[in-house]
Amino acid sequence: MCVIHPGETGFCCARGVSAESSGDNTKRTVPVVFSLSYGKLTSIALDPIEKKPLHHFHQGSVILSVGSFGCNLKCPWCQNHNISMAGEGDVQTHEVTPETLAVIAEQYVPEGNIGVAFTYNEPLINFEYVRDTSKILKEKGLKSVLVTNGYANPVYFDELLPFVDAMNIDLKGIDDDLYKQIGGDLETVTRNIRSAAGRCHLEITCLLINGVNDSLREMEELTDFVASVSSEIPLHISRFFPRNKFKDKTPTSIESMKQFEEIARRKLKHVSLGNV
């Protein structure tokens, strides 16, 4: 729902607006939002599927992982801020069409590749590219994976679901004030988590940060929410290390990690600790 004026770039750094003819035999123009990042990749690597992290989806396989630039949230702790908070002119990109990316993915099948993971920056802001590539991957029998914050207009989120095989959604916390501080809202994310559950393989990650989302109340409420969707959803509790604007913070304590794990295991069947 970002409002962008002609000549401006959106909050995500990956959307622009052009003035195009209205097409009604008048001289009127209408603003049209377009993608600045379509087919422009900043990163590409062959990763273990467990690194996404997806621990219950084609275990032991690898997946071609790609990223672009920009993000629709501004997390001061972001570990990929060099691309997620960058615009088109801030980073080096390589143009790769959906067709070419699908062919590259296919070439790595003999090495155990199962498809493409859209990751590193926020893939949902590059909706058209993810959609177009995922359609081709499906035709080739390859998998499409999103590593995402889950924050997107539900209309477009739901349009992607038939073409996506798995997601890991980063749930920042269970506090709407926290989401407002980084430019989003909790309701949209929880709604999309519910929508994805049962329609593709879903795992959830929570990066535990001292003094941000690590109170016992928040741990319990986050666990309750995930369990209300399904106790079968794997939850990854990830340890924070100083990054970006949070360089002065201390790493998450192992004690907090274990407390969260104990709470989560009361209601969830698959809980794991990451970055420990």
Image (tube, rainbow, N blue to C red):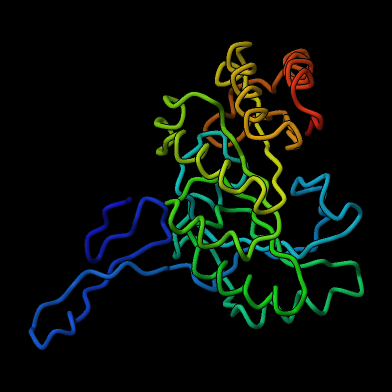
User: Residue 14 or 225: which is nearer the viewer?
Assistant: 225
Residue 142: horizontal and vertical position, in percent? 76, 71
x then y, percent, for residue 243: 61, 35
Image side of residue 130 versus residue 240, left or right = left
Q: Quadrant of residue 119?
A: bottom right
Residue 104, image x and y in percent? 75, 78
Judging depth in this view, the residue of 230 and 50 nearest the camera is 230
Quick check: 109 left or right of 222? right
Residue 239 position, x and y percent, is 72, 28
Q: Residue at position x 69%, y 34% from top? A: 230
81 to 58, vertically: above or below: above
All told, the count of numbered labels is 0
At horizontal 73% and vertical 33% (from top left) the residue drawn is 235
Q: Say left or right for 245 vs 230.
A: left
Task: Using the rendered image of the protein, determine whether residue 272 is visible from the camera's viewpoint.
Answer: no
The answer to whether residue 117 is visible is yes
Image quadrant where residue 256 sits:
top right
* Image vertical order of residue 194 relative to residue 253, above or below: below
Give the image quarter of residue 242. Answer: top right
Q: Residue at x 10, y 88 (%)?
A: 25
Position above or below: 237 against 130: above
Q: Residue at x 43, y 56 (%)?
A: 155
Give the position of the C terminus as an image quadrant. top right
